[in-house]
Amino acid sequence: MIIDWAHFTPWSALLGGIMIGVSAGMLILLNGRIAGISGLFAGLLTPLSSGYGERAAFIAGLVLAPLLYWWLQERPEIVIEAGPLALVIAGLLVGFGSRLGSGCTSGHGVCGLGRLSPRSLVATLAFMGSGFATVFLLRHLWGG
């Protein structure tokens, strides 16, 4: 992956981060629910569960906001260097890992750390460390 520094806009990234933090904070303060996406999505699989409408609205916002941005803004070309099989396997591993780790990266990194959860700190350090190690191995030792 190569970062297109000509189109990188730190202000929009900062604004996006603030919006994620505010929405996660509002969800827990107003509804008592944690904005962990894997947990919210899992709740959609049982339609009779409490808070189904709120979960559906939150997930719909996650899907519709990027589509709206895509429609309104000029965007750089996106190049995916992995094949379809690799993407499917990666998606399944992420789903398995989020269930194994009792939450996804957003749940632990944004919401858990915001609540000063020791478990989320350990989880965040583990997945960040794993990502750093993977990039180092693929880029520097295995020549990828």
Image (tube, helix red, strand yellow):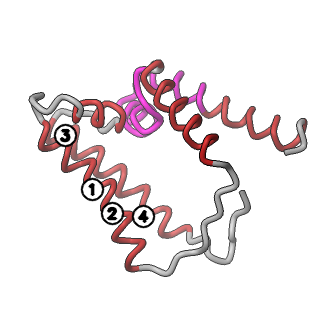
Residue marked by disc 3: 29
Contact, CB < 8 Å: mark 2 with mark 1? yes
Label for residue 44? none
Task: Please tell me how crowded label 3 is: few (under 14), some (14-19), or many (20+) other residues with Cα within 10 Å.
Answer: few
**Quadrant that contains the N terminus:** bottom right
* Residue appearing at x 52%, y 37% in the figure: 91
Q: Is residue 46 above or below residue 55?
A: above
Q: CA distance from mark 2 to mark 1?
A: 6 Å
Mark 3 or mark 1, earlier in chain:
3
Q: CA distance from mark 4 to mark 3?
A: 21 Å
Mark 4 or mark 1, earlier in chain:
4
Residue marked by disc 1: 61
Residue marked by disc 2: 65
Q: Is residue 85 above or below residue 2?
A: above
Q: CA distance from mark 4 to mark 1?
A: 16 Å
> What kind of residue is marked 2?
Ala
Residue marked by disc 4: 15
Magenta span: helix, strand or loop, mainly? helix
- Mark 2 or 3: in front is 2
* Residue appearing at x 59%, y 43% in the figure: 87
Task: Please tell me how crowded label 4 is: few (under 14), some (14-19), or many (20+) other residues with Cα within 10 Å.
Answer: few
Task: Tell me the element at label 3.
Answer: helix
> What kind of residue is marked 3?
Leu
Between 20 and 142, the residue placed more toward the observer is 142
- Position of 45 with respect to 99 (left or right) is left
